[in-house]
Each structure stands twice: as structure tokens, then as C-alpha cells.
Amino acid sequence: RLISLLLCSQGLAEENVRQPTEDVMVVEGHPTTLTCLFDTTSQSQYLFWYKQLANGKPIFMLRRDPFSPGESASEFKDRFDAHLNVTAKSVPLTIQRVQLSDSAVYYCALRPTVTAGYTAPLQKHCVQYFVLCAIF
């Protein structure tokens, strides 16, 4: 079976997050990597990945930063991983053994996203917010 994954980017006006591959088709059981590139003037580069199912709120997957090993939500520790590359300004998300339940919208963000009590993602402390999505 083919599994479709949709990628979205979010960030602040002075910061930029790009996910150049907007949708990905993967054969079930195979691995895939979702690209996330970023630009920021901040020295504190905290990158987050979220998963959002249809009509659901964003679910925190993991956080990576240059100061610690980061953290991963327990449900994503087995098959999901990301490595922050400060030089390349990237934090690709790798999914091992892709399953049908992995079909979702995946967000890469430079800021934590509010995930409780809302069906749409919101940004904390942001003046200008944007979401770039491809709908198929």
C-alpha cells in the first residue's frame, strides 16, 4: 500500500521554516525522511516536529536543539527520529517502517505550538504567523 504524508511549515516573520517536499508517497513498511530547512537569527535554535491527523489538533512528536539530546514523546520514540544539523540548517524527520496510521500532516516549527484545546495550530508569542501547506 502507498501511504501519503503531507508536510506543512510554520514560523515567525523574521524566521523561516521550509519543507520543500510538500507531499510524500511511501510504500508501507519502508522508511522515509521528511525534510525541514530553517533560517533564524536566534542563537537558540529549538526545532519541533508535530503530527496532525484530519480534524485533530497538532500532536507534539519531538524537539531538537544544539544544547541537549532533545526530547521525544513516548509514542514516537520507536520509529521516529530527527537530527538537528546547525551547519546545514536542517532537522529532517525519519520515519522507520511507515504504517498506514502515519498518514497525516507533519509540521516543522521553530517555536512550540499550542496543542491543547484547539483544532488549529497556534503559535505562542508570535506577531506574524503563517502556515504553508499543499492540499491534495
Image (tube, grey):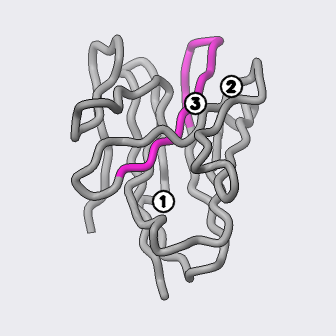
Q: Earlier in the sequence, mark 1 or mark 3?
A: 1
Label 1 SS: loop
Q: Is residue 48 magenta?
A: yes
Magenta-colored stretch includes residue 42: yes
Q: How far apart are marks 1 and 2 (CA)?
A: 23 Å
| Residue closest to the eye, 43 or 77 | 77
Return the x and y of residue 32 as percentages of the image width and height.
Answer: 62, 67
Q: In this view, does 19 lie to the left or right of 117?
A: right
Q: Residue 125 versus residue 73: which sits nearer the camera?
A: 73
Where does residue 65 sit, x and y in percent of width and height?
Answer: 68, 25
Image: magenta residue range: 38-52
Circles 3, 2 touching at the beta carbon (< 8 Å)? yes
Instruction: Count neighbours of disc 3 (C-alpha within 10 A) and say few if under 14, some if 14 to 19, many if 20 or more.
Output: many
* Residue designated by label 2: 65
At a point 38% along the width and 35% down the height, the residue shown is 10
Residue 48 in the image: above or below residue 35: above
In depth, the one of 129 and 76 nearer the eye is: 76
Distance between the alpha carbons at the discs numbered 3 and 2: 6 Å
Amino acid, disc 3: Leu
Q: In this view, does 111 lie above or below 71?
A: above
Above or below, 72 relative to 8 = above
Q: On the image, numbered disc 3 is attached to which residue?
A: 47
Amino acid type at circle 2 is Asp
Q: Disc 1 marks which residue?
A: 21
| Disc 1 to disc 3, C-alpha distance | 18 Å
Q: What element carries label 3?
A: strand
Q: Where is residue 132 in the image (x, y as percent from the top left)?
A: 32, 44
User: In percent of the image, x 31 and y 51: which residue is there?
Assistant: 133
